[in-house]
Image: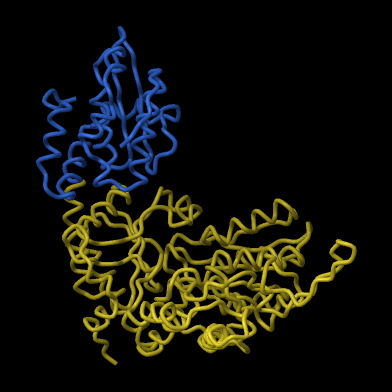
């Protein structure tokens, strides 16, 4: 199927905007994608016609909105082929998802003698929460080595595993390098040793069909705003309701079945079932329902079509970038959507600032992965990340601008 | 520093450009004259914390006259450093204390085309210099 990218571009009103006199070329999709009209319209309609809070009232509006939120839960469970919608927990983003798992399952099940395994290419969100909890519980955090091309060293992973390894928590696709990690292979290794697996799928979900049952991971986390959905939605998939028996991470309204107070002292609290007991307080209703529309948008184009098209643009971009003198591209060739690079010794902030003058938005800096920057001995990188609305014309403008910038920075 | 460069010229040059792009290109080219001595400047003791990019500033006082050298790993910041260094360089501390840097910054109008993190960085640089020179002034971009 040949996609009409000109037509797809029209679905995203922001792409008509001009920045510094130039039509916007948005290439920072790994940070957050732009939103199609269908998502914007859904949110507008919601506030105009159907707004109230969820799980609170017996009145019509509350029932409508609760149904819409729960239908989104069903849609997400189907999108990733979960066994049941109850395996899906709504949080505000992937970072909160990881923090929730670490501070519930991790806190309950880890002890001083244990260790957990992450990799050197993790986003800070999959490092810092582990480190914070380790300060409390004193378990060991082991880190898998990566090769110069950014491949995970599977032999090193097997070397790190011992009888006290409880969790392997890894990124599916590196947000910095774009490398696709051999997650299935790693999960199989983990299962052999009865180790729990947490997969950060933030960069995979909008570019690749995810089948959690086939992967056989225990947790899979992603954010809605990286898949054309609104900000403020994160998803936790927890296999067979792994978190079910645990206490909530955050207390609040909407998670309580009963509170017993005797003589002004709290005697006991009974919580409602998972996933709802992990969703304390008023939910991010409009974002969850907006995410439903974003999934419809993706499904209408077809995730496989998106993947094929983005790969075509990725290859085109990699090929064109070769014409930039002194460019260094990081990571191996098996990438999805993401290309990190530096040019000569020019600072990535200069390149980012100057590209902005041409209306081009890219990510610059350490990309929340300081360990990778130190591994490659750089203070930062430029990162192009592609989405369905990026065209060859966009890439040609990027290449032209990079050539002009290189001349200026000489 | 090139003799033709002075505060008035920089203000006039920046004013003459219609687009932000031209202003940024100008600042990048301006920064190419820094540092005056790379080896002596990039030392830990000269680093300014609070800036998005690495910035080094070295201040010398001789016969009550200030001499500043600066460097950054970012070309744009080097250009901005020049605009600041010019305010202080080769002047007596007493004279600097009488001058209001905020009036100068206002004329440069940097805030119009700098990101907020860059603006915070510029303030950090000026505060660093002022602290070294015992100048107590609030900085506004």
Relative to residue A91, is residue A248 drawn left or right?
right
- Identify the residue at image location x=40%, y=40%: B51
Quadrant of the image containing the C terminus of chain B? top left
Q: Which image quadrant for residue A328?
A: bottom left
Is B98 rendered above or below residue A280?
above
Q: Quadrant of residue A385?
A: bottom left
Instruction: Decide if residue A158 is on the left or right side of residue A50.
Output: right
Residue A410 visible to the viewer = no
- Residue A324 picture location, percent across and down: 22, 59
Residue B25 image position (x, y, % from top left): 17, 45
Residue drawn where x is 37% and y is 40% of the image: B120
**Chain B: drawing colour:** blue
Outermost residue to the bottom: A1
Front position in the image: B76 or A67: A67
- Report x, y in % for residue A275: 66, 79
The one nearer the camera, A67 or B51, is A67
Residue A186 drawn above or below residue B114:
below
Residue placed at 71% from the left, 75% from the top? A243
Coloring applied to the structure? by chain
Q: Classify residue A350 as left or right of residue A212.
A: left
């Amino acid at each position: 199927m040949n996609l009409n990218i000109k037509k797809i571009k029209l679905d995203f009103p922001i792409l008509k905007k001009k920045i510094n006199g130039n039509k916007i070329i948005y290439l920072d999709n790994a940070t957050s994608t732009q939103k199609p009209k269908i998502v914007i319209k859904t949110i507008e309609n919601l506030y105009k016609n159907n707004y109230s809070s969820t799980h609170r009232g017996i009145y019509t509006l509350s029932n409508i909105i609760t149904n819409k939120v729960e239908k989104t839960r069903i849609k997400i469970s189907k999108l990733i082929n979960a066994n049941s919608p109850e395996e899906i927990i709504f949080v505000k983003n992937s970072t909160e998802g990881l923090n929730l798992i670490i501070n519930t399952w991790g806190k309950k099940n880890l002890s001083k003698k244990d260790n957990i395994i992450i990799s050197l290419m993790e986003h800070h969100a999959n490092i810092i929460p582990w480190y914070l909890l380790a300060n409390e519980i004193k378990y060991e955090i082991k880190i898998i080595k990566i090769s110069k091309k950014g491949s995970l060293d599977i032999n090193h992973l097997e070397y790190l595993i011992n009888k006290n390894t409880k969790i392997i928590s890894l990124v599916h696709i590196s947000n910095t390098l774009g490398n696709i990690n051999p997650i299935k292979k790693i999960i199989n290794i983990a299962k052999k040793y009865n180790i729990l697996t947490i997969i950060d799928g933030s960069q995979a979900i909008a570019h690749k069909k995810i089948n959690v049952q086939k992967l056989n991971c225990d947790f899979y986390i992603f954010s809605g705003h990286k898949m054309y959905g609104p900000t403020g939605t994160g998803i936790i998939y927890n296999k067979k309701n792994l978190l079910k028996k645990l206490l909530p991470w955050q207390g609040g309204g909407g998670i309580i079945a009963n509170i017993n107070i005797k003589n002004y002292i709290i005697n006991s609290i009974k919580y409602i079932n998972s996933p709802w007991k992990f969703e304390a307080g008023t939910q991010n209703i409009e974002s969850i329902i907006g995410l439903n529309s974003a999934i419809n948008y993706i499904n209408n184009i077809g995730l496989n079509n998106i993947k094929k098209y983005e790969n075509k643009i990725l290859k085109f971009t990699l090929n064109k970038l070769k014409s930039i003198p002194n460019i260094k591209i990081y990571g191996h060739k098996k990438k999805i959507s993401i290309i990190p690079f530096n040019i000569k010794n020019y600072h990535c902030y200069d390149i980012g600032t100057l590209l902005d003058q041409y209306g081009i938005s890219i990510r610059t800096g350490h990309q929340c992965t300081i360990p990778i920057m130190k591994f490659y001995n750089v203070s930062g990188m430029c990162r192009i990340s592609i989405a369905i609305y990026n065209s060859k014309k966009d890439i040609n403008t990027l290449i032209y601008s990079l050539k002009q910038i290189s001349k200026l920075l000489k | 520093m090139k003799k033709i460069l002075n505060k008035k010229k920089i203000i006039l040059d920046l004013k003459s450009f219609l687009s932000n792009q031209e202003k940024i290109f100008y600042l990048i080219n301006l920064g190419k004259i820094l540092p005056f001595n790379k080896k002596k400047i990039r030392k830990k003791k000269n680093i300014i914390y609070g800036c998005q990019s690495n910035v080094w500033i070295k201040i010398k006082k001789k016969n009550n006259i200030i001499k500043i050298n600066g460097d950054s790993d970012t070309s744009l910041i080097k250009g901005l450093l020049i605009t600041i260094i010019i305010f202080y360089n080769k002047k007596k501390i007493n004279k600097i204390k009488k001058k209001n840097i905020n009036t100068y910054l206002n004329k440069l109008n940097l805030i119009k085309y700098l990101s907020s993190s860059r603006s915070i960085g510029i303030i950090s640089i000026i505060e660093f210099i002022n602290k070294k020179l015992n100048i107590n002034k609030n900085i506004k971009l």
